Image (cartoon, helix red, strand yellow):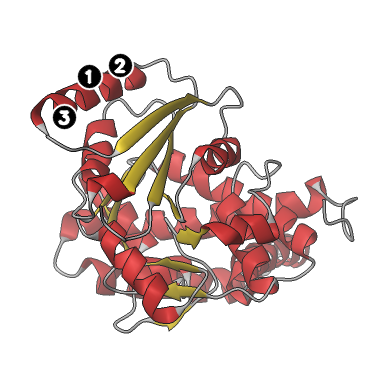
Amino acid sequence: MSDLPLVSVIMPVRNEASFIERSLSAVMRQDYPPECLEIVFIDGLSNDGTVALVSQYLSEVKANTPVTPSVYLLDNPKQHMPGAFNLGVQKASGDIIIVIGGHCVIEPDYVRQCVGALEATGADCVGGPMVTVGETTMAKGIALAQSSRFGVGGVAFRTGRREGCYVDTVAFGAYRREVFERIGLFDEELVRNQDDEFNFRLTQAGGKIWLDPAIRSVYYSRASLSRLWRQYYQYGLYKVRVIQKRQAVPSWRHLVPAVFVLALLMSLVFSLLTGQRRWLLAVAGPYTLANGFASLRTAGADTAILSFLPLAFATLHFAYGLGFLAGLWHWRNHWGQQS
């Protein structure tokens, strides 16, 4: 019997029939000893056959593999991500709990690298850079925008780091079990940004989050600008609630899109009131130039992707900024309240 720590991988999904086998098989094929690994699969009442595909895949694996990790299949009647996370944490029996998404593929050594990084650093949570990819030309453009400093700022797990470092948040983090005992579970009011709030709560409590370049995963981006818009609008909307609950700003980069959108709106108003275009150009002009330069630099010689990149960048910035401003209004009566 191995003396390695037991690791629980929590995997919440809903309607991922077209992708679930890739994601689940990546977890099942970890090079970590299977007797030290368990998988808690939480389904949000999918209606596209996701659970049937999971059951079929697991049956085939068990029939052809001598030893496999323990797998638990749970229903998530709340149908939102924080509820799924919490069900998974409560079911998990591991010393280390890794939370991953159903639309990503982790590398075969992901669990082993996480365990090693936790032991080497003494951190409370570890994670790694997430490589964002797309399967269509537009999705590839969106993926590049989401991995660019111009697109998302200095988010370490998106833009990557050559050396390990302490950060404010990671994607698909591996947590010591005592973290949940110390600071509680995920906040179920936050249907978006629940992981950011949890990591912010952890660092406010004195916890440390380590990003290690050896911990690698691939995330498949949204395939359309409309879906990207909805995603980032909600990110901006719920970021306001995170700030209210934690009574602090995790990073000033979260405010930049809202300041930009507000400045653009004010310049438009001044332009209409005065009849002078220079007010609008004062903000729109520099942004257009910056967007064009970033798009050229990011796309390189790929002209097909270049045609989408400016729109992808603009979608990220405007959706998040407008969502943040909407959040300020939506939760205007909640300032000073942590819950």
Front position among marks 3 and 2: 3
Task: Return the x and y of residue 157 as percentages of the image width and height.
Answer: 40, 68
Q: Earlier in the sequence, mark 3 or mark 2?
A: 2
Q: Quadrant of residue 46?
A: top left
Please rate how many residues cluster around mark 1, counting C-alpha atoms within 10 Å: few if below 14, some from 14 to 19, many from 20.
Answer: few
Residue plotted at (29% across, 82% down): 162
Tell which of 327 and 168 is nearer to you. 168
Q: Amino acid at mark 2?
A: Ala
Q: Is residue 53 left or right of residue 156?
A: left
Q: Is residue 292 visible?
A: no
* Residue on which disc 3 sits: 61
Residue plotted at (15% across, 62% down): 302
Tell which of 108 and 326 is nearer to you. 108
Q: Amino acid at mark 1?
A: Gln
Task: Return the x and y of residue 58 as percentages of the image width and height.
Answer: 23, 26
* Residue on which disc 2 sits: 52
Is residue 165 shown above or below 337? below
Q: Is residue 312 left or right of residue 315?
A: left
Task: Return the x and y of residue 60 as percentages of the image width and height.
Answer: 15, 24
Residue plotted at (30% across, 25% down): 17
Q: Is residue 44 visible?
A: yes
